[in-house]
Image (spheres, helix red, strand yellow):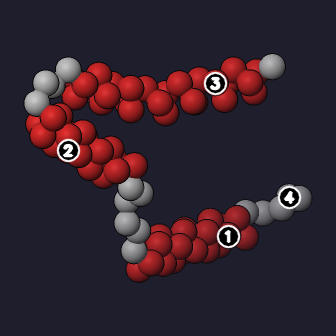
Amino acid sequence: MRCIWTTLAALIIATAPAAAIEQNCRFIQAKVEREACYKRQEDELTAKRKPQPTSESKSIEQLQQLRRDDEAVYRSINGICRGC
């Protein structure tokens, strides 16, 4: 039951911006202006939904840093006396 409510909440949140956009442009009387309004807001929505570009070099740098951190932790663990 909890999964259903979570899914419904996600759908409501996802459709809320689209409904808000429609309300803003819908009352413009001039057809050309109204269509321009819809176009602008559609462009804004697609820009918001577009995932941020990630570069592979940044990901590789992050993985290398994690590997260096892991090696430092392993060295410190090996220095601890076990069973003393």
Q: Nearer the viewer, residue 38 or 29?
A: 29
Q: Position of residue 5 (x, y in %)?
A: 69, 20
Secondary structure of the residue carrying tag 3 is helix
Q: CA distance from mark 1 to mark 2?
A: 54 Å
Q: Circle 1: is it few (<14), some (14-19), or many (20+) Cα within 10 Å?
A: few
Q: Nearer the viewer, residue 8 or 39?
A: 39
Report whether 13 appears left or right of 5: left
Q: Tell us which disc is closer to us: 1 or 3.
A: 3
Kindly indicate the quadrant of the structure image that contains residue 82. Answer: bottom right
* Identity, as a three-letter code, of the amino acid under mark 4: Cys
Earlier residue among tags 4 and 1: 1
Q: To which residue does mark 3 refer?
A: 8
Q: Please state, as top left, top right, bottom left or bottom right, where the N terminus lies in the image.
A: top right
Residue 27 position (above or below residue 51): above
Residue 65, visible in the rendered structure: no
* Identity, as a three-letter code, of the amino acid under mark 1: Tyr
Q: To which residue does mark 1 refer?
A: 74
Earlier residue among tags 2 and 4: 2
Q: Tell us which disc is closer to us: 1 or 2.
A: 2
* Identity, as a three-letter code, of the amino acid under mark 2: Arg
Earlier residue among tags 1 and 2: 2
Q: To which residue does mark 4 refer?
A: 84
Earlier residue among tags 3 and 2: 3
Q: CA distance from mark 3 to mark 4?
A: 57 Å
Q: Circle 2: is it few (<14), some (14-19), or many (20+) Cα within 10 Å?
A: few
Q: Position of residue 28 (x, y in %)?
A: 15, 25
